[in-house]
Image: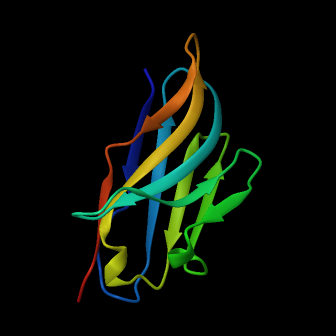
Amino acid sequence: QVQLVESGGGLVQPGGSLRLSCAASGSIFTIYTMGWYRQAPGNQRELVAAITRSGATNYVDSVKGRFTISRDNAKNMVFLEMNSLKPEDTAVYHCNADLMSVGASRRNYWGQGTQVTVSS
């Protein structure tokens, strides 16, 4: 069984920084694209940033220049460095991985999420 576990969320003041981490574990054969999504109360889940296995990235316009996504393929991890945080960044952040596990088909997996709250 594959699991994605996020860490690094918390409460931060506007203008502050946080670093989210996500570790994928289990019988993983290959991880393709990894990404971070967020969902605020009353809103739909939105893609924040994604990174391919080769390192190509894309970001939602609202976080460009403030957030940086990266990954460690050897450790099956993905990170999200968040700077200059704003109250509108408050949400539950979920890790996502498009991967193939041993003996199974390629599919998307989700983590449980980590709360990020930006408030003074």
In the foreground, 11 or 94? 94
- Please indicate whether residue 79 sits to the left or right of residue 120 in the image: right
Which quadrant would the N terminus be assigned to in this image? top left
Residue most extreme to the top: 103
Residue 31's x, y, as percent? 63, 35
Q: In this view, does 4 lie above or below 26?
A: below
Q: Which residue is drawn at 31% across and 56% down?
A: 114
Colour mode?
rainbow
Identify the image quadrant of the C terminus.
Answer: bottom left
Q: How many labels does the image show?
A: 0
Write down the quadrant of residue 103 in the picture.
top right
Q: Residue at x 55, y 80 (%)?
A: 66
Residue 61 in the image: above or below residue 1: below
Residue 22 place in picture, x, y as percent: 47, 48
Q: Where is residue 117 in the image (x, y as percent from the top left)?
A: 27, 73
Where residue 2 sits, quadrant-wise, is top left
Residue plotted at (55% across, 68% down): 60
Using the image, determine if residue 28 lies above or below residue 64. Answer: above
Q: Is residue 39 left or right of residue 37?
A: left
Q: Quadrant of residue 45?
A: bottom left
- Write the residue at 57% across / 17% down: 105
